[in-house]
Amino acid sequence: MHSIRIFLFCIIICTFSIVGVTSCGDDDDDESGDDEEEAYCDIDGEGLVEVPFSSFSSDCNGAIGVAFTLENVLANDTLTIFEARGSYSINNDNTYYLRGDGLGDALCFDRISNSGSYSSRNQSLSCVNHVSFDVVTSTNPDAVAFCTLSFVVDISCDNPDGDDDDFVDDDDDDDDSISCADAWSFFDDCGWYLEDEEGNAIDIADLIVWCEAGEAFYGDTGYDCLVNNLGNCDGAADCISDVLDNYGDDDDDTTDDDDDDDAPVLSSGGWDPAVTTLGEFTGYDERMYYSALFWSVCDVNNDLLPEGEVFVYQSGTTSPFMQGELTWADLNNPPDSDLGNVGDCNDPVQTGINVIFAPESDPGTPGTYCADIEATDNAGNFSNLLTNLCVTHNP
């Protein structure tokens, strides 16, 4: 085994706040008097034909109360442009946008509010079988995704006949097979990665090579997790985590149940204030809506600094709540919040961070936003998960 844990990989490095919960506007059938920016799509939809799909899933209903159905999927003959069509209903008064994932230089946003039908496109830079769309609150390309809907196109990128005019071939068993490259590329596209014994991310090319060589986990149980959950990132991650947990007797698996006693303990989390408020921040020309996310921590080994990490997720998911990476060293602020002195669990140390939501001139969509937090110490021991920490944004 080359790793014991999978991690969400966030490439964007910036200040630890979400800027871009901004509001944009009318696209087509929605009646609104608001003077809002229109949704748009600059992905060419010509030449698309209907293709078979499966494994449709969405975490939006639990995350923000948007229920989706998927009725039709269209694609071009190279499986680089897709159009998803279906219906939706929203259990709140917020306005959202459906944004394609992996778009390259192209963008497509479909405005959704109340209930109705949607039609949105996705463009990838190379042939793919698994497709996903993010739900966001703005047509800003960097807007934070609150949830995702995804599906699998039941056509292989490998065409053994070389016939581009008939790329849908349900009678060819080879078209329905999932290669090691397809499976582990799906894992990579989900934003997950594996670490080696030294804590370095394992290159996706190595994972594919080990899979094709039939190496344990990469070519059997781990591969099966990906194939059986293709299109469902969270399901694949849960399955792989369970498989890795079963490697407890493997010399390469450093997971030790006794490490639970050495892990950080998080407690007493919340937001202050409970409703976002306006404040002034360096680097911004106007006042910003914000609130402070806070929690307490102790670690019996007093081992948070300097390498321990903090992960803030959208509640109930493993999607990041904030852009950028966050470490205990970033939060260390003695003497008020001395994270180098957290060994007494009878007296945990409170810490936290300001989270910026939107500028005063463009306050964005009102709503309740919830976060989960977990963290590691220097040794990589994971803390408990602090869940359902919610703040109201009501400008």
Image (cartoon, rainbow, N blue to C red):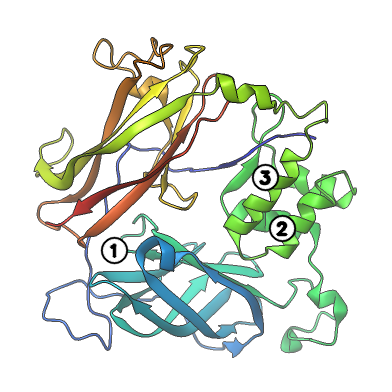
**Residue 279 visible, this angle:** yes
Residue 166 point in image, percent of width and height: 75, 89
Which amino acid type is shown beneath numbered disc 1? Ser
**Residue nearest the observer in this picture, 120 or 296:** 296
Q: Are marks 1 and 3 in contact (CB under 8 Å)?
A: no
Query: Residue 201's x, y, as percent?
Result: 64, 35
> Residue 241 — which label?
3
User: 74 or 115, which is in the foreground?
Assistant: 115
Q: Nearer the viewer, mark 1 or mark 2?
A: 2
- Residue 190 image position (x, y, % from top left): 58, 55
**How far from the left and from the top, in percent, is residue 4?**
70, 34
Q: Is 257 on the left or on the right of 133, as rendered?
A: right
Reading the image, the residue beneath label 1 is 138
Q: Which image quadrant for residue 259?
A: top right
- How far apart marks 1 and 2 lie (CA) works out to 31 Å
Q: Identify the secondary structure beneath mark 1.
A: loop
State the image quarter where residue 48 is shown. Answer: bottom right
Q: Which mark is residue 226?
A: 2
Query: What's the distance in space between the residues labelled 1 and 3, CA to CA?
Result: 33 Å
Dot 1, how many residues are within 10 Å of its Cα: few (below 14), some (14-19), or many (20+)? Answer: many
Q: Looking at the picture, does residue 300 appear above or below residue 185?
A: above
Q: From what the image shows, is residue 323 above or below residue 2?
A: below
Q: Is residue 65 left or right of residue 368?
A: right
Mark 3 crowdedness (10 Å alpha carbons): few <14, some 14-19, many ≥20: some
Q: Quadrant of residue 394?
A: bottom left
Q: Earlier in the sequence, mark 1 or mark 3?
A: 1
Point out the tag, 2 or 3, that comes first from the N-terminus.
Answer: 2
